[in-house]
Image: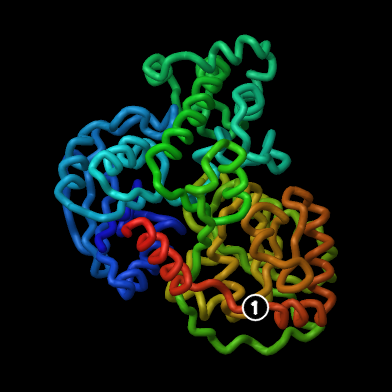
């Protein structure tokens, strides 16, 4: 059986959890007699090229000129789409599996695969296909059910839209895509509303956001039409797709797993006198919530023994500088280098607990599985995928995401109650692996192929 995996970007480019998981998964899929090829967009490139990465052929199709990122999922094929079309039509593959839903890898790609007679699968790895704000946090504060509603979503994604009458918002939502695509600052609706975009952006936003929301809704229905199976990687995403009218018979829940980790020898159990060693691994990104964590540690009485070590991944340099300023000369908080995949097991073995203070609905994250695989409990936001993976009081501790005092109280308890930390460590169960994930995927492919 031949399967094409399609993405908006791939290694050796800078990539995230989607590509890490797929790269770990591919050798396991091959053991199920599945031949894999990867197609990934090459943003801004005018030429196509092919190479091998981890023994898999990767085809990079040109996307030129660089397209606007909104309305969202490629209602129109991007420039040089014909290169991708020619390549795909020559592959004679059985299954087409798409992992992104954006302009570089979106609706036209999926539709083409269906027209070529392939069985089609889309995995949704993030809130983007349903949320204009991209976080699924209503007004940035509370968890949203994910139902796309032009009025509610427009007012959530744009503060000025709240001043417009409902009838006007509904009228604006019917602006043709061809007009929306030509309006200035099309990315403005894609950013957090706190971003200062200048007067033009603030002026244009209320008029384009309703159309973007409507386009997102239509796009999701088109996905449901052209995909034979849609995979959600967590429970909340599955429920959000159902609530938006994706047929349940097309939907499957298939969580990501991690590559087998060889546990390092864990440091001996923490003694009362030793500081609680907390580690944060993640992007310098406001949605990853490291500011909440830093504030919580800074609010602890100086007598509480604690160390916070941050292994940040470059993303938002302005946000990183804000955090450095916030830390100041506090000796309890250290910034360390970004860890490679190979360094992760040994590094994690030297900490007591992993912190995952995300301020949005994660669909994983893989780092929680990696921590648990090394017998490291997790203190995390009581949101989304983190709340699905961490069992409060059993193998970790769940905290109200944006409540600094709640984080301070939780860290103080963990730092002073040695028995609690040991109890959480004992409660960790074996984690889901890529072997399990590959077996589930192979079964999905096999059902579609026969």
Side (left or right) of 391 relative to 253: right
Question: Where, quadrant-wise, is the C terminus in this rendering?
Answer: bottom left
Residue 35, position in %: x, y?
A: 25, 65
How many labels were placed on the picture?
A: 1
Front one among 400 and 238 = 238
Q: Secondary structure at mark 1?
A: loop
**Image check: 128 left or right of 402?**
left
Eyeballing the image, is 325 above or below 52? above
Of residue 432 and residue 362, the one placed in the foreground of this image is 432
Return the x and y of residue 396 as percentages of the image width and height.
72, 69
- In this view of the protein, can residue 242 be seen by the observer? yes
Q: Position of residue 205 (x, y in %)?
A: 54, 20
Name the one closer to the observer, 41 or 241. Answer: 241
- Residue 275 or 158: which is nearer the viewer? 158
Can you identify the residue that label 1 sits on? Answer: 429
Q: Position of residue 133 (x, y in %)?
A: 58, 35
Q: Residue at x 56, y 63 (%)?
A: 281
Residue 416 vs 67, above or below: the answer is below
């Amino acid at each position: 059986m031949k399967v094409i995996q399609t993405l908006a970007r791939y290694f050796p480019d800078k990539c995230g959890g989607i590509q890490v998981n797929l790269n770990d998964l591919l050798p396991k899929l091959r053991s199920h007699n599945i031949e894999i090829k990867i197609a990934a967009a090459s943003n801004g490139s005018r030429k196509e090229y092919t190479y091998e990465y981890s023994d898999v052929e990767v085809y990079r199709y040109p996307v030129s000129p660089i397209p606007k990122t909104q309305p969202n999922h490629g209602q129109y094929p991007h420039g040089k789409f014909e290169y991708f079309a020619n390549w795909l039509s020559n592959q004679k593959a059985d299954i087409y599996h798409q992992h992104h839903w954006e302009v570089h890898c979106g609706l036209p790609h999926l539709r083409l695969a269906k027209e070529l007679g392939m069985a089609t699968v889309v995995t949704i790895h993030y809130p983007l296909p349903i949320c204009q704000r991209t976080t699924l946090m209503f007004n940035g504060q509370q968890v949203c059910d994910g139902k796309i509603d032009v009025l509610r979503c427009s007012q959530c994604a744009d503060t000025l839209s709240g001043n417009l009458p409902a009838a006007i918002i509904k009228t604006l939502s019917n602006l043709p895509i061809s007009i929306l695509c030509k309006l200035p600052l099309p990315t403005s609706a894609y950013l957090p509303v706190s971003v200062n975009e200048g007067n033009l952006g603030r002026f244009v936003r209320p008029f384009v956001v309703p159309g973007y929301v409507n386009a997102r809704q239509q796009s999701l229905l088109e996905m449901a039409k052209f995909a034979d199976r849609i995979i959600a990687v967590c429970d909340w995403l599955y429920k959000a797709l159902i609530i938006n009218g994706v047929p349940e018979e097309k939907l499957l829940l298939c969580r990501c797993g991690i590559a087998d980790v060889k546990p390092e020898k864990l440091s001996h159990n923490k003694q009362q006198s030793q500081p609680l060693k907390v580690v944060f691994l993640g992007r310098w990104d406001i949605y990853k919530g490291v500011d909440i964590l830093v504030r919580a540690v800074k609010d602890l009485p100086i007598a509480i023994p604690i160390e916070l070590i941050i292994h940040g991944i470059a993303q938002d340099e302005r946000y990183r500088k804000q955090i450095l300023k916030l830390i100041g000369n506090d000796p309890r908080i250290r910034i360390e280098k970004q860890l490679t995949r190979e360094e992760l097991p040994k590094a994690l073995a030297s900490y007591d607990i992993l912190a995952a203070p995300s301020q949005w609905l994660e669909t994983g994250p893989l780092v929680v599985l990696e921590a648990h695989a090394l017998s490291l409990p997790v203190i995390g936001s009581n949101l989304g995928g983190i709340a699905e993976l961490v069992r409060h009081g059993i193998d970790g501790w769940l905290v109200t995401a944006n409540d600094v005092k709640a984080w301070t109280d939780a860290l103080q308890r963990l730092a002073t109650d040695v028995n609690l930390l040991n109890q959480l460590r004992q409660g960790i169960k074996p984690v889901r692996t890529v072997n399990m994930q590959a077996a589930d995927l192979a079964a999905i492919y096999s059902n579609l192929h026969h």
